[in-house]
Image (spheres, coloured by chain):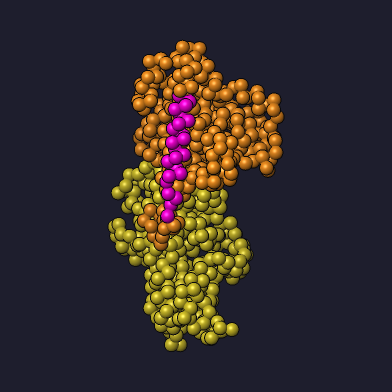
Chain colours: A orange, B yellow
Amino acid sequence: MTNLLKNIDKGSAQEEHPQVRLYRMMSRIRAFETRAQKLWNHRTGPGPDGEVTEARHMPGFVHLSIGQEAIAVGVCTLLGEKDQIASTHRGHGHVIAKGGDVNRLMAELYGRVTGYCRGKGGSMHIYAPEIGVLGTNGIVAGGIPHAVGAALSSKLLGQDTVAVSFFGDGASNQGVFFEAMNFAALWSLPVIFVCENNFYTEWCNYERLNSGKAIVDRGMPFGIPSFQVDGTDILAVRDVTSEAIRRARAGRGPTLIEARVYLHCGHMEGEEVITGKYRSAEETTSWEVRDPIIQFGSRLITAGVCDQADLEQVRDEEKRRVEESLRFALESEPPGLEELTMHLFADEVNS
Amino acid sequence: MKAYFTHAVRDAIAESMRLDSTIFVFGEDIDKSVLGPTQGLVNEFSTTRIRNTPISEQAVLGAMIGSSQTGLRPIMDFMFSGFFYVAMDQIINQAAHTRYMSGGKVNIPIVIIGGVGPSGQAGSQHSESPHALLMGAAGIKVVAPSTPADAKGLMISAISDPNPVFFLMDVSLSGVSGEVPDGVYRVPIGVAEVKKTGSDVTVVCMTSTVAPALEAAELLSAEGISLEVIDVRTLSPLDTKTILKSVEKTGRLVIAEHGRRICGLAAEVSAFVVEQAWGSLKSPPVRLTWPDVPIPYSPNLELACLVDTKSIVRGVRESLVSEGSKIN
């Protein structure tokens, strides 16, 4: 155990080596998503770890981001609390990376009153203004203009905050994406468009759906500096994002980043019964060796920042944190029936 | 002071902007303002606060939503309400539903302006009246004034309201002038106005059917028929209490709507009156609406869609002669 890590158990994250901190955040997302995956897939019977999961039945359906952690963490850890993000249906990782509380996130997935939205939003509708999350979003590309709007506020109110819009390759074919780029470029708004291109729009390879050579090219007609980056490499993601943030804060307008990445899970849990197998074993394996967390861990060890045992400890701590979030969620109450008609209007007219 | 309808709207925006520097207006050519609600405002507030946007309804409304979450009080002028449909995701999935989905944490304080109804052979797409669709969206307020004074007071209320508010401007009222109080005042959202009290038939009306309803009341009073005329003013949330109270008194209901028939204002008012005041009804509610067609271009057909004084008089007579028919 190196000195760099000695205080992490006490929660004094500031004293943790910044790069280990990145590893920790990625591990937290991974732990959350893999736990959610297991819970979802064994939600109506005994799970592989012997648990009786009936009581743990996870409602709804989930889109997980296993394999995409380097983008969420790479980008969000460069943002301040007042910087805003707009996320997607695959947004748990973004919320966690922006400083989200896994207890409240898990509670929201379970539809509990202690969740981020009192259990009324669910996995695809997480709103957390307290940490600069404008919202995750169940509509593909629906959140892109919200980030542009936050950037507009920043500019018109004379602030120096920036906004990030996360979206996938599917959203790159929505008209509002192009409208938003034009709008942001026109007024030099401090917004960063981060396309997480995981090569599949739902279950269809994006090359069958996208014309042109690459998504990154779509920023060029608007004069938006556009970069393609390896989305499994957190340091590469950070390099290109740092530059984008610097440009945005300096009043030089938007940036488009296409981060190429791969999902180590499906588009959504439970999809197999509908889709069967739609990706080849070769393809899946070729990306598995590029797992962002394993890659980054190796780099930390090679650089002498920490050793394998340290990383294992970080992963264990994050797994425990997520286990605790499950306990928290299951011990929380669902919203009372009186909440059914509450929260529609700020002044509760007719509700 | 006398003012035209659209100028009353404009004055409400200007007076609100003077008091709150976070109010900005966005929309297509709003420095010139085809329908008038922002006409001339650029001279006082410059292009910093009166901002012409690209014709990108989805992105612009989406940006309004994001900006309203982060400190702005944006007003977006869509010009014609037929253009709302371009931005339907942002209107319903996003603006309307965000507060509820967030468990009451996130407010979306935006005002959306749109001209409704035919303005004189503009054809269907520039003559829409989409209030029924908005009324059913859950999470947005919809106001639709019929006089310049209400237009100003409702706009001031809309701007200071913490929820998304649609401000529907009946374009056929643009040239109507009326007495408008000076300064900042509010007409409360969600409160109908009894324009005329009466005892025989309740006529519920909106926007450009209000004046014809009052005219019909005048004509019928010569025959000894007394109409109670209610201008709903707000379509969502509807002031059901005022309507029920009136029907309980008169026992007869005619609804004059500036829009199509199926699932519209008239349908909704009929439904809740039948549910909640069945015992008071002496005859079935009469719905006066546009037919369920897109507004046609040809002037004679366009005119034939609209609810006017004649059709209201006819509707009232129908309500009076159909005594007892509801039980058949």
Q: Which is nearer the eye, A81 or A18?
A: A18
Q: Where is residue A106 in the image (x, y as percent from the top left)?
A: 47, 40
- Residue A325 in magenta? yes
Give the dominant element type of the magenta stretch: helix, strand or loop.
helix
Q: Which is nearer the eye, A207 or A126?
A: A126
Q: Can residue B261 be seen in this view?
A: yes
Q: Is residue B296 above or below residue A7?
A: below
Q: Position of residue A197 (x, y in %)?
A: 59, 31
Q: Is residue B146 visible?
A: no
Q: Is residue A273 above or below residue A1?
A: below
Q: Which is nearer the eye, B289 or A259?
A: A259
Residue located 49% across and 14% down the image: A301
- Residue A350 in magenta? no
- Which quadrant: the N terminus of chain A? top left
On the image, which quarter does residue A202 sit in?
A: top right
Q: Which is nearer the eye, B64 or A284?
A: A284
On the image, which quarter does residue B155 sit in?
A: bottom left
Residue located 44% across and 57% down the image: A337
- Which quadrant: the C terminus of chain A? bottom left
Q: What stretch is highlighted in magenta?
A: A314-336
Q: Where is residue B302 in the image (x, y as percent from the top left)?
A: 59, 66
